[in-house]
Amino acid sequence: MNLVLLGPPGAGKGTQAHYLERDFGLKQLSTGDMLRAAIASGSEIGKQVKATMDAGKLVPDAVIIAMLQERIAQPDCKGGFILDGFPRSLTQAEALDKMLAARGLSLDAVIEIRVDDQFLVERITGRFTCGKCGAGYHDRFKPTRQAGVCDACGGKDFVRRADDNAETVRARLQVYHSQTAPLLPYYRAKGRLRTVDGAGEMDMVYRQISGVVKALPGG
C-alpha cells in the first residue's frame, strides 16, 4: 500500500506517518531525510545534492524523483510506503505518478489533513520545549502542570523556535496554498483523495486516517 499525506505546515503529517508506519507495516519516507542521507553517503546523487544545496538552490525535481525511485526499491519498502512532504507541486505529482507507473506501482490514496489557517497559527506559535530535557509543551493545548517548571525534569529554562512566529507561519501557509493546494483537485480527479479533519487531538486525527487506510483494498 502506497500513501501520500498532504497538509499545511503544522498539520501533523510527520506524527501521523509515524503512527501509520507502526500499525500498517509501511515505511515513512521523508524527502528531507533522504537528501541528508544522500549527502552523507557520498554517492554521485549525494554530491549533486550537496553542491546544489551549498549554492542555496532548490534540488531539481528530477533528482528527488531519482532518489525516491532508488529508495522505494529497497527491501524495507516492500510492504508499501508513506510519502510525507512530497509531492509539493503539480509537476512533482505528475513526475511521481510517471515514475511509479514505470515500476508497475501506483498511489492507493492521498490523505489530506485539513486544518484551518488560524488554528495552525495558534498551534505552531504556542509551541515551546524544555531547554534541559527537550520535553514539548504548548501554551494552550499542553501547558506545564506548574507554571515555569518542566513536568519531566523540573527544568525552568524553556525555548521557542525562532521561526515559530505568526508572520513566518502565515508566509509558509501562503506558499502551501499557492503551490501545494492545487494537488487536491488533481488527486480528486483520479479518485485517490481522502480528507480528514486535522484540528483535533493527534489520536483523534489518527483514528480518521487509520479508518481511511483500513477501508482501502488490502487495508
Image: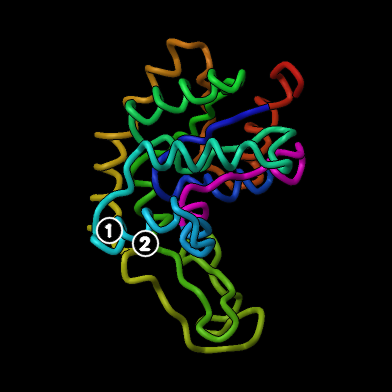
The magenta stretch spans which residues? Answer: 21-35
Find out whether residue 133 is within the magenta segment: no
Residue designated by label 1: 166
Give whichever of 7, 39 is nearer the camera. Answer: 39
Q: Examine the rendered structure and indicate whether residue 126 appears above or below residue 184.
A: below
Looking at the picture, how far across and down is residue 17, in whole percent? 61, 44
- Identified at 33% across, 32% down, the residue is 89
Label 1 element class:
helix
Q: Evaluate if marks 2 and 1 touch, with contact meaning CB atoms under 8 Å apart.
A: yes
Main secondary structure type of the part rendered in magenta: helix
Q: Is residue 214 left or right of residue 106?
A: right
Label 2 element class:
helix
- Identified at 73% across, 41% down, the residue is 75
Give whichever of 10, 38 is nearer the camera. Answer: 38
Residue designated by label 2: 125
Find out whether residue 29 is within the magenta segment: yes
Looking at the picture, how far across and down is residue 179, in whole percent? 28, 34
Crowd rating for badge 2 (residues with CA inside 10 Å; few <14, some 14–19, many 20+): many
- Identified at 47% across, 22% down, the residue is 97
Q: Is residue 66 left or right of residue 28?
A: left
Crowd rating for badge 1 (residues with CA inside 10 Å; few <14, some 14–19, many 20+): some
Q: Amino acid at mark 1?
A: Ala
Quadrant, the N terminus: top right
Q: Examine the rendered structure and indicate whether residue 48 appears above or below residue 21.
A: below
